[in-house]
Amino acid sequence: MTTTTVDQLTSHIAHLERRRRMYGGLFATIFVVLFISSFIVAEDMNSGSFINGLGQFFDYPTAVVEESFEAGSAWFGLLGKNLPSLIDTINMAAVATLFGTCFAVILAFIASKNLSPLPILVPVARRMMDITRAFPELIIALFLIFVLGASPVPAMIAIAFHTSGALGKLFSEVNENIDHGPLDGLTASGATWFQRMRFGVLPQVMPNYVSYALLRFEINIRASAILGFVGAGGIGQELRKAISWSQGAETSALFVLLFLTIMTIDQISSYLRHRLVGHSFLRTAA
Amino acid sequence: MVATADASRIDGTYAKVMSASRRQAIWPIAILVLIFGYLTYAYIEFDVGALLGESRLERGVILATDSYAYKVHVERDFVDGETEFSIEGQRNTRFDGPPEWVTLDANDDLDIDLGDGYRITVSGRTTTFFSPDWPPIVAESNGEGVTVEGPIPEWARVSEKKFEARPELFKRVQVLRNSVEVHRYFVGWENFWFEFSSPLHGISGAQLWNMALHEPRIDPERPNVAYIANEFWNNSEWQHGDVFIALIETVIMAFLGTALAAMFGLPLAFLAAKNFNPFAIGRFALRRLFDFLRGIDSLIWSLVFIRAFGLGPLSGIMAIFFTDTGTLGKLFSEAIENIDNKQVEGVQSTGARPVQRYRFGVIPQILPVFISQSLYYLESNTRSATVIGALGAGGIGLKLVETLRTGRDWENTLYIITLTVIVVFAMDIFSGWLRRRLI
C-alpha cells in the first residue's frame, strides 16, 4: 500500500487545476475562433453588409408604423377582414395537435420501458420518435404541398408528424416516472393490460399530458402560421402577401392579430397548466 | 359480479358517492364527443374531401420513382430518320452511340431489349411490342395518326394519335404519328459523381483509384487527385460544392445566432432577476422586452432583417439572435431567481468582493442551465435555420426550395433533404454529447 502525503495531494490538485484551466482556455479559444470566422464568412455571403444594415434596420418598421397611422380607422377594419384567416391558422394548429397527441400517446406507451406491452418494440418506438422529432416540418410540408396541392391539410399533417415525436418523448418520460403502486394493485386483481393502463396509469399521467399538449398547441400555432408562408393558407400566407407587396397597414394589422393570439393562448394555457400541475412542473417542451 | 339486489342496496346507502362517480364517468365521453364534433367541423371547413379528390397522387408516384431511379430515352423520328439516345431526354446528356441493350442495324432498324422478356422493334414506321404474356402488338405510325390491330392489354392505351404502353413502372413506350419514344428506367442517381460531359463520367471506382495514383496527369497543371476532386465538386447537375457551402451557411446561422443570444441573454437575465435588480420598473421593462422578442417568431424577424441587411445569412443570424435573446433571457433569469442563496452568503462571508460573489457564488449554480439550454437551442435553431433560409435568408433551405420549384430533378431534392436531415441529426448528437461532457 502506498502512502499519500499532503504534498502529493496538493501537487495532484494543482495538476488537476492546471488541466481544468487548459480545457477551459481551449474551449474558449475554439469558440472565439469559430465565432469570428463564421461572422466573416456570413458577412461575406450576405448581399448587404452588417454596418450598412444597422443604419437601415429601423427603416422598414418605421414605414410600416407610418402607413398604419395613415390608414386611420380603416386599420381596425383590416383586423376584422383578416379574422377568418386567423381562425384557419388556429384550426390547423388545433387539429394537428389533436392528431399529434393521439399518436404521441400510442408511441409513448410503446416506448416506456416499464409499461410497454412488447419490450422488443421499445427501442423501435424511441428511434421513430427521434426521427419524427428531428425532421424539419417545413420539408414535409413542402413535399406534401407538392403532392396534395396548396392547402392547410399538408401543413396539418406535417405539424402532426412533428408533434407526435416531440410529445411522445415527453410523454414517455412522464410514463417512466409514475408511481407503481396502483399498477401492482391492478395486476394483483387480475386486470388486463388495457385495464391497468386505463385505471393505473392514465389518472396519474393525465394532468402532465394535458399540460404538455397545451404547451405544444402554443408552439403549433406559430408553426402553422409559418407554414402559411410556403402556401399552406391561413394568416401566414396573408402576412407574406402583405409584406412582399409592401402593404404597411395590412402587415401591421396581421402582425397585431398574430401577436395577440399567441399572447392570449400563452396566457390561457399557462393558467390551465398551473391549475393542472402546479408551479413545480414547468419545463419547456422539446 | 355484484348482484342486482346488492347493487340497488349500495345505490341506496351511498347515493351521493355513486352519483358522483357516475357524473365523473360522463366526462371522458363528453370530451370525446366534443373532439369528434370539432374534427367534423374541421373536415368540412378545410374541405378535405374535395382536396383529396383534387390531389395529384400521380405526382407522388413520379416523385417517388424519380427520386431513386433515372430513365434512358431512345427516340426515333420517322420524318428525318434520326435516332437519339439520352439520359432523361436532355440535350446535354446525349450518348454518342446506342447503349448495349439496343441494337441499331445497317437498315436503321432498332431492336430494344427492355428486360424481363419485354422487347421492342422498330422497322420503317412499324413498332412492334413483344411481351411475355401477350401476343406481339403492332403499331403503325402513318403521319396522320397511329393504328393498332387487334385487342390490347390493360396496361396499354390507344387513341387515334397515340399508342402508349407501360407494363411495368420501369418500362414505357410511346408511339406517336411521326415518332416513337422508349423509356427504360434504371435504379440509381445518374451523373452523381461526375457530370455527363466530364471525361471522368462512367469510369469505375477502381479505375479512378488507379488513375489518381499511378497514371500520368490528365491536366498537366495539377495532380490527378485534385483534378478528380474538382470534377466532383463542380458537378453542375448535383452542385456538390454549392450544396456543401449552403449547409455550412445554415450551421453558421444557427451557431452565431445562438451564441450571440446566449452572450447577450445572460447579462440581461441578471438585470431581469428579482434578487439582483432591486428596481421593479427596470425588471418589468426587461421582462416585456423578452416577451416581445420571443413573441415575434424568428421567421418574421428574418423578414424585417432581410429588408435591412439584404438576402443572406446575416439576416438569419440576427433573426435567431433576437428571438432567442428573449427565450434564453427569460429562462436564465428564472434560473438566477431560483439559485440557492447560501452559496452566495458563504462566498460573501470570506470577504469576497461583489464580482467574486457572482463569479463563485452564482455562476457555478446557473452554469448547467446556461450550457444545457444554449446547446438545446443550438440544436433546435439548426432546424429553424433551414426554415428561415427557405424564405430568403439563404443556406440549405433556399437550395431546397429552388430544387422543389423546378420540380424536375427529384433526386436532387432527395439528396438535399438527406443531407439536411443528416446535419440536423449530427447537431443533435453533437450537442447531446457536449452537454453530457460539460455537465
Image: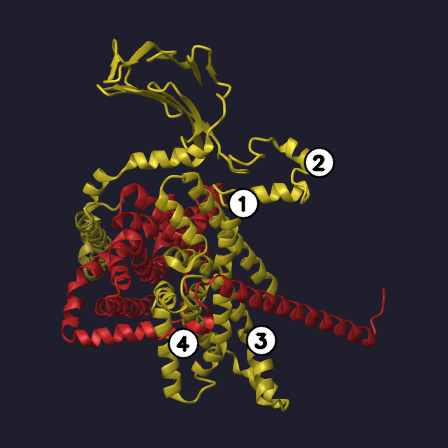
Chain colours: A red, B yellow
Q: CA distance from mark 4 to mark 1?
A: 38 Å
Residue appearing at x 54%, y 59% in the figure: B431
Q: Quadrant of residue A211?
A: bottom left
* Few, some or many residues within 10 Å of mark 1 (<14, 14–19, 20+): some
Q: Secondary structure at mark 4?
A: helix
Residue at left 82%, top 76%?
A: A7
Q: Is residue B349 above or below residue B52?
A: below
> Is there CB contact under 8 Å for labels 3 and 1?
no
Look at mark 4 in the image and give the residue it sits on. Answer: A55
Q: Amino acid at mark 4?
A: Gly
The residue nearer to you, when weighing B145 against B154, is B145
Residue topped by disc 1: B234
**Camera-side mark, 4 or 2:** 2
Question: At label 1, which amino acid type do we have?
Answer: Asn
Q: Residues within 10 Å of mark 3 (few under 14, many from 20)?
A: few
- Read off the residue under disc 2: B216
Q: Nearer the viewer, mark 2 or mark 3?
A: 2
Name above or below for residue A189 compared with residue B268. Answer: above
Query: Which label lies toward us, 1 or 2?
Result: 2
Left or right of B235 in this view: A227? left
Identify the subunit bearing mark 4: A
The quarter of the picture where residue B194 lies is top right
Mark earlier in primary sequence (1, 2): 2
Label 3 – label 4 distance at C-alpha? 39 Å
Residue shown at 28%/42% (left/top)?
A148
